[in-house]
Image (cartoon, rainbow, N blue to C red):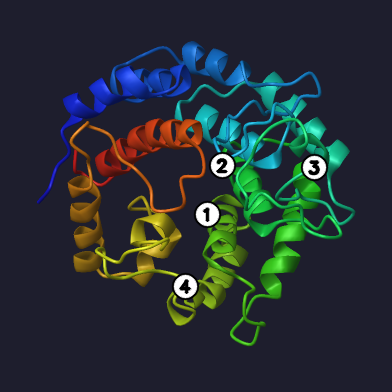
Amino acid sequence: MNTPDFNAAAAFVTASARVLDQRRLERLFQDGPASAVRDAVAAYRNSDGGFGHALEPDCRAPGSQPPAMEMALRILDEADAWDQDLVRGGCDWLTAVAPAEGGAAFVEAGPLAGGPHAPWWVPEEGHPASLVATGLIAGTLHARGFSHPWLDGATEVMWNRIGKLGADMPAGIGGGYEMFGVLAFLQHVPDRNRAREEFGRVGPLILDREMVALDPEAHGEVHGVLAFAPEPDSLARALFDDATVAAHLDHLAGEQRDDGGWTFNWPAWSPDAERDWRGFLTVDNLRILRANGRL
């Protein structure tokens, strides 16, 4: 059974990661203060209440974007550094820029003009709600029991869109990234009976549509088992046997680099983005490994 070298990982984060990820490491593994994580997240906040400034490393522009909002919420939640005022301001911003149907777009076009960004950050024609952005944000808000009008609309968007997913949906719809949003929403939405019913219907699409790479050694920009089911209580764990999960955990631990950090399997379009992602993912992978008894 592979286990990571925590000291090497901590040294990598200290030497190479953002202050934000250094604070995450301190909070999650070294009894650091929640306030330090909260303050680090708040440094990425804009006057409109949203978040930008490369909080999500693939957009280096300062303007507010839904993926940066999602990352802010995720970090505040995992570090138990939840700040009602920060979150409410972010949801007010989401309301102001929401698509006509509600929810959140993947990319807001206007703020992209303020700086470089990954080539796949392309606003969708018609400004539709994004399953991945809406689902991930709504899932974290529901996990925290947060109440806001934006979340009410986003919840309806997710139920409606999930209801249209199925074996007969057109090719290209319901890909791996979109399924991350679906799973995050179903994991935490309060209507548990409906969530379990919908997961029973759409969850198997992860296997049927070959969204997941069951071979932990698969190369390329693939999504492994832990991308869909990172923790023992993840809904999608029911799709995979224990041996497959264990193999992916072994692989994750074994992927630690000689410098102590982890890297990723999607294109590294910018040295700065690559550095920031590696710091974020090193802390995240340690968190996942610990949750699964590997640290």
Residue 244, given in percent of the width and then of the height, sits at: 24, 67
Q: Earlier in the sequence, mark 2 or mark 3?
A: 2
- Tag 1 and tag 2, C-beta contact below 8 Å: yes
Residue type at the position of mark 1: Gln
Q: Earlier in the sequence, mark 4 or mark 3?
A: 3
Q: Which mark is residue 150?
A: 3
User: Is 233 placed above or below 262 here?
Assistant: below
The quarter in which the C terminus is drawn is top left
Residue 131, given in percent of the width and then of the height, sits at: 67, 58
Q: Disc 4 designates what residue?
A: 206
Residue type at the position of mark 3: Trp
Q: Is residue 152 left or right of residue 14?
A: right
Q: Which mark is residue 187?
A: 1
Q: Secondary structure at mark 1?
A: helix
Q: Nearer the viewer, residue 138 or 55?
A: 55
Q: Earlier in the sequence, mark 4 or mark 1?
A: 1
Q: Is residue 198 left or right of residue 111?
A: left
